[in-house]
Each structure stands twice: as C-alpha cells, then as structure tokens.
Amino acid sequence: MSAKELTVDLVIRYGFQVLGAIIILGVGLLAARWLGNITERWLERRAMEPPARKLAVRGVRLLVLVFALLVALDKFGFQIAPLVAGIGVAGLGVGIALQGVLGNLVAGFTIIFTKPFRLGEYVELVGVQGQVTAIELFSTTLTHPDRSRVVIPNRKIVGEVLRNFGAIRQLDLTVDVPHGTDLNRALSVVRDVVRENPRVLKDLEPVVGVAGLSTLAVTIEIRPWVSVADDLPARAELYQAIAERFRASEIEIPFSRHEVRLLAGSGAARLDNPQAVA
C-alpha cells in the first residue's frame, strides 16, 4: 500500500473521530470560559474575597476542561478507568517528589478559606512586615513602604505567629521638652498639630500625654491613627509641624551640653558633662 493510499485510509477511518475530538475540545474551552465568567459574576455579587473567588473560578474551568478531555479521549476508544488509575499512581509519585510545592498549595487553601488577613491589610509575620498585595495558591506577597516586595511561601505562614494591623496603623511618636516647660501649653500645641494634619484619621481619638520623665526632659507621647499608606508621610509631617510650632511658641527642645573648664594654675583642662538643658 502506497503512502497516499495509507493516508486516505487513515483519514477515512479516523478523520471523523479526530474532527469530533477537536470540536469537543473547542466546545469545552468555550464552555469553561463561559461557566467561569458566570461563576465569577455570581461570586462577586456575594462579596467573596478575591483569592477565594479566583480559586473557585479556576476550579470550575478546570473541571469543565477535564470533562471535555475525557469525552474527547473516549472518541478514540480509550478506556477511561485504566487511564484514571494510571494518573492516580503517577500523581502519588509526583506528590512525594513535590512535597514542598504541595505543602504551599495546601497552606494556600488554608489561608484563602480561613482569612487570617485580607488584601490591603498591613501584617507582620515570619520576621517581616508589609502590606498584603497578593494572595496566591503557593505564595503571599507583601509590599514595604519603600516599594520592595517580599514573597513568602504559604507553608511558612500557616502555624506561625501573625500580627495583623489591618488597614490602619497607630503611630508611636515622642518629643521631649525641658522640665520648666508649661506642660498644658505644650500638650495643647501638640494636639492642635495632630488635629490639623489631614492624614490623621478623625474618627479615632489620638493619644497625647506625658509618657515619661528623665534627668533631661519630660517625654510627650503622640499616638494618632493613620491609614497604612500614610504611615511614613504622616510621621514626617507631624514631626516637622511640631518642631515649627514649638519654635513659634518659644517651647524649647532639650539637648545635652558639655562644659570645658580651665583650672587656673593646673595647666590642664577639665571636661564636665553635666547633661544640662540649654
């Protein structure tokens, strides 16, 4: 039998099966996309978290594609049961070889469904902190205020101590004033500065008060609430505004002073450090 005759024979014998399998796969792809879009819109109306919604949509599309593939293979006369059993055995071997990857996957499912943190929240975990910008099946991405990214494998997150700041943070600022300062006046100036800053959240009362005493000064603690994105800008603006307002109100900020005294007739200088307030 010539090559031409063999080709014609194969086309006559298997052509319709191949065409049918291609049509089934094409319909399966369209159906997977269509059902995925419907599922995504349905889940959006129920306010499901983006990571969980993405996972559900991918699962629906994958199931439709697997079903279409099995139907297409059946057109060629493949026995589905032995194929599924073979895939199971191969999957077991792959699972043993890829324990770390599967561990990340299982941890990703745990994070998505237990929701210890959400997108946009500021968290601290495994020694690093940042704003959550992506929750994937295998890893979670944090972004620092300096725009650097930290990608953490999900298996490193589950079971660890997690500190979730949420979408807002409380700043921890301090400023020192000399002991002779009118504290009520200084606290009033600080409160005015905090109240006037547009980045400070108005619905949460800031904490402003005396935090400690030392030989040099009285320490005033300032703890306003700001959004995560305004953490560094608000900190810089408040310190600058307090320094300028203190200067305008003639409220001094203490600093150490060294005195050098020359003793007559000794030929030597004595250095004193009384830690005085200028």
Image (cartoon, helix red, strand yellow):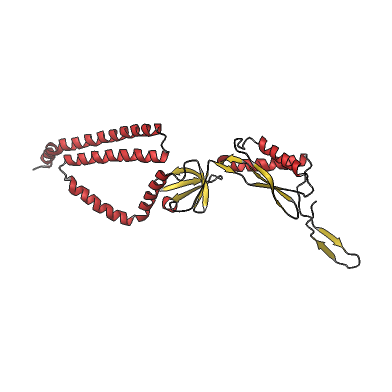
**Residue 258 appears at what percent x and percent y?**
80, 57
Residue 276, image quadrant: bottom right
Name the residue at the right extreme.
Answer: 265
- The residue under the point 25% across, 53% down is 90
Q: Residue at x 72, y 39 (%)?
A: 188
Residue 196, horizontal then vertical, whole percent: 67, 35
Q: Quadrant of the N terminus?
A: top left
| Residue drawn at point x = 32 percent, y = 41 percent | 59
Up/down of 267 relative to 119, above or below: below
Up-down: is 123 above or below 196?
A: below
| Count of numbered tags | 0
* 18 horizontally vs 110: left or right: left
**Closer to the camera in the image, 263 or 8:** 263
* Residue, far bottom: 266
Q: Position of residue 69 (x, y in %)?
A: 23, 40
Residue at 83% across / 60% down in the picture?
260
Q: Nearer the viewer, residue 170 or 15?
A: 170
Percent position of residue 73, x then y: 19, 42
